Amino acid sequence: MAKGEGAESGSAAGLLPTGILQAGDRPAQVKKEPKKKQQLSICNKLCYAVGGAPYQVTGCALGFFLQIYLLDVAQVDPFYASIILFLGRAWDAFTDPLVGFCISKSSWTRLGRLMPWIIFSTPLAIIAYFLIWFVPDFPQVQVLWYLLFYCLFETLVTCFHVPYSALTMFISTEQSERDSATAYRMTVEVLGTVLGTAIQGQIVGQADIPCLQDPNGSAVTSEGANRTHSTTSLRETQNAYLLAAGVIASIYIVCAVILVLGVREQREPYESQQAEPISYIRGLRLVMSHGPYVKLIAGFLFTSLAFMLVEGNFALFCTYTLGFRNEFQNLLLAIMLSATFTIPIWQWFLTQFGKKTAVYIGISSAVPFLILMALIERNLIVTYVVAVAAGVSVAAAFLLPWSMLPDVIDDFHLKQPHSRGTEPIFFSFYVFFTKFASGVSLGISTLSLDFAGYQTRGCSQPAQVRFTLKMLVTMAPIVLILLGLLLFKLYPIDEERRRQNKKALQALREEASSSGCSDTDSTELASIL
């Protein structure tokens, strides 16, 4: 759960003298034919897109099901469950810039600079993922067990996802081709969330999860004659989670193999002429001082946090607040299928009306449906309608961040043409902020449930718990979405600036790849830019 305006400074294209944009005006150079646009085949785009599925399949399963698994299947105390969820996500966030730093120091190999990270992290990641869903026989080590393997898996999947995200900038030098590949990627990533939801939900949903009646009721299912049945049912549920983990791990391997065999990294023409990459600290300072980047991540920080709150608490909300214990996996599937089918619509929309307009309409469309979800009272048909409609907004939240981030990097390259190797910093710190916020949200929400009196494996929950879940899934996300949209007003890259940046970058690439261009000419061009 797989996603522009202003005038902060003049366009770099506007700063280019006519003599640079028209190479024939230089007396010392031979006029060159315009370089043919680099086109990616549909096969290339599909192979690239498939690489996004492992992160989304595993992330969806963990995001939607780990909380309820720890509380009701592994029977971890809610306080310790909140610690596991918070520390796991916080560690995950910390590893993103760390991996980004290591990648920025990596040398180009025969496979590229990013592919070796993807190849070597995959087998270790699937082992760690499988062990997250295993219940150890020693209850006293449960907290340490889940914290250890959760953090280990998040580290390894980061070694996969950060280079994969940065790969967007190395599959083509054409902005339109990258946007098209990103749309393919987002479609497959949403399909990945559908797979994660369907596999985890449907396999686990077949198991009879035992629960405890209200302590004030007349029976407790885990006592007396029902003790053996409850223990057997719990064991079946644990095995169902392991089966789902095995299926998802297999998908992870297949997608990684397709990515490695079907995609080739490409270096920028002007990059090979430059010296060694700048230092990580200097690169980080330059990246974090780039205004469009700061404003973009600030806006998506709040909107992503809103959707993560919904994701992390939706299973519990459906189970206890709406009373649909056996339907929540189907509701999740309805949301993700709706998102999958609307990704191409949003791709068309952003090309016709611009990315900032798509952000405002796409993200804000979730607000009325969240309000309706807060008002409905256990009406299954209305809940399905709301779920399908909410999927439209989820699709926009998936597509837009990853479609807009390459625009920010292009803008940065024009202002800092000698700052080579900063792409992993851009992607890793974007993911860092969203993951850290996600860890805070999950930790606080689980802790809030503990304070409200959450009963592990309860067939029902107290009124305070149901109210807390409603606030976490409806009102809190609405506030965060509105804050994020306000911040997007400050984002300076609109469609006009994107077109100007595209022209300026194309001039830089043609000048760098021209056989008649000397090192001195390249330095002069970069200085003027």
Image (spheres, helix red, strand yellow):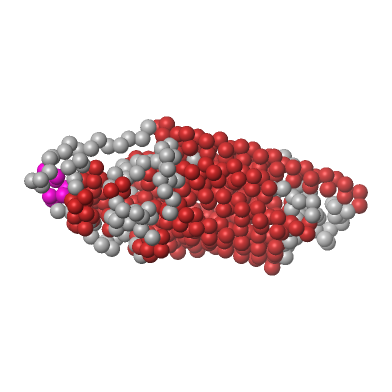
Horizontal relation, residue 44 to residue 30: left or right: right
The residue under the point 57% across, 61% down is 90
Q: Is residue 217 left or right of residue 124?
A: right
The dominant secondary structure in magenta is helix
Residue 454: quarter of image: bottom right
The residue lying at 83 percent from left, 48 percent from top is 230
Which x, y percent locates residue 227?
A: 87, 50
**In front here: 501 or 386?**
501
Tell me which residue sits at (42%, 31%) in the image: 43
Q: Is residue 348 visible?
A: no
- Residue 250, horizontal then vertical, whole percent: 61, 37
User: Is residue 183 found inside the magenta-colored segment of the image?
Assistant: no
Q: Is residue 24 magenta?
A: yes
The front one of 221 and 407 is 407
Magenta-tinted stretch: 18-25
- Count of numbered marks: 0
Q: From what the image shows, is residue 337 above or below residue 89?
A: above
The residue lying toward the viewer, choosing from 264 and 290, is: 264
Q: Answer left or right for 345 relative to 205.
A: left
On the question of residue 24 being in view, the answer is yes
Could you say where residue 21 lies in the image, as x and y percent from the top left? 16, 48
Query: In the picture, residue 9 is in which quadrant?
Result: bottom left
Q: Residue at x 12, y 40 (%)?
A: 30
255 is higher (above) or lower (below) than 18: above
- Residue sitting farthest toward the bottom: 451
Quadrant in which the C terminus appears: bottom left
Q: Position of residue 13 (x, y in %)?
A: 21, 53
